[in-house]
Image (cartoon, grey):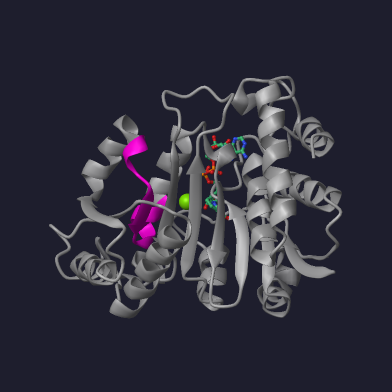
Amino acid sequence: MYRVTLIPGDGIGPEVTEAAKRVIDSTGIQIHWDILDASEALLKETFNSPERNRVALKGPITTPVGKGFRSINVMLRSKYDLYINLRPIISIPGIKTPFDGIDLVIFRENTEDIYCGIEYMKEPGKAEAIKTITEYASERIARSAFEYAAKHGRRKVTVVHKANILKMSDGLFLETAGRVSKAYPMIEFEDIIIDNMCMQLVTKPERYDVILTMNLYGDILSDLCAGLVGGLGFAPSANIGKDMAIFEAVHGSAPDIAGKGIANPTAIILSGAMMLDYLGEKQGAERIRKAVLKTIEGQRVLTADMGGTAATKEFTEAVINNL
Ligand code: NAI
Ligand code: MG
């Protein structure tokens, strides 16, 4: 029996996490879920429960734009030092996009960059934000990316930066990645400037394998890459630290479709499969991935973003039937 913290989040969060929970429970793997919402009363618990359980599955949480509290997502990642944000992007048979055969993974540094939240009004009409890059954090994310590449038979690591402008901060990240790459001579290493990378990705995405980058570029590239394989409904992710991990979709709370029961739960279901991998339940994880692919390939029960008319619940039930 595993104990896992489940944070439903808000917006479409409760709808899609419920779907993921049902699919995971249907594998027969015994999980005791500690379900916590991020409402004020439970906020403290939300921050402490993952510490006890070491593993959490989390729905998106809305963050006010331009004012209000700091992102709870960013706070969770920094509290638990979840320094790896691992985001696989894979073409899904049956989903029509301009590209086939995309199979890449993003390694996004998850603890620093401008997400440190150091911002101030220098004087009226002049705001400043601090970007922090350390050799320590750059080295551990670079090492994680290369270790992953070596372990999973990946051929290339591409480091993405803007070191032509940010010579010191991005320069340090790039230089550190280059140094780490020396220990992995069998893996090709290249670097590319972020703006060019955006263009390359929307024209020749099949060229990329493992993408290693800083927090902000990783955030932006993740949504861009999700778009390459059909949209945010398909992109899972893991926030991984030394002995703890939080699994969540790349997407946010999708206020435009929240409460309608039509969200695509694939991203969080696949995040749940990543969680099972992390727990050592490889077979359960594989069964879930196969069931999702079979459901989509069947083309009969698809949510609106996939061109169908099925509700979240109907899609989820079809996945469970295909397990
Ligand atoms: P979003 O990712 O919530 O939505 C972007 C677009 O994608 C919308 O049109 C939405 O309907 C669509 N979409 C997203 N997920 C979908 C799904 N599963 N099925 C079908 N369509 C889907 O991005 P947005 O609107 O910029 O952010 C909304 C809120 O979410 C913000 O407050 C933001 O801060 C927060 N957010 C939270 C995250 C987290 O908790 N980890 C991550 C990203 C954003
Ligand atoms: Mg994002």
In-image side of 129 versus 82 (left or right): left
In-image side of 112 versus 295 (left or right): left
Picture coordinates of residue 56, whole percent (x, y) = 68, 65
Check the image and report above or below for 183 versus 270.
below
* Front position in the image: 265 or 7: 265
Please give the name of the residue rendered at 40% of the width and 63% of the height, measured from the top-left corner.
145
The reply to whether residue 72 is in sight is yes
Please give the name of the residue rendered at 78% of the width and 51% of the height, measured from the top-left corner.
24
Magenta stretch bounds: 206-219
Query: For residue 305, which quarter of the picture?
Result: top right
Residue 158 lies in magenta, yes or no? Answer: no
In-image side of 112 versus 173 (left or right): right
In-image side of 300 versus 186 (left or right): right
Picture coordinates of residue 247, whole percent (x, y) = 62, 59
* Front position in the image: 216 or 160: 160
Picture coordinates of residue 287, whole percent (x, y) = 73, 45
Query: For residue 58, which quarter of the picture?
Result: bottom right
Placement of the N terminus among the 4 image quadrants: bottom right
Image quarter for ligand 1 equals: top right
Check the image and report above or below for 269 versus 281.
above
Check the image and report above or below for 200 versus 274.
above
Please give the name of the residue rendered at 52% of the width and 22% of the height, measured from the top-left corner.
96
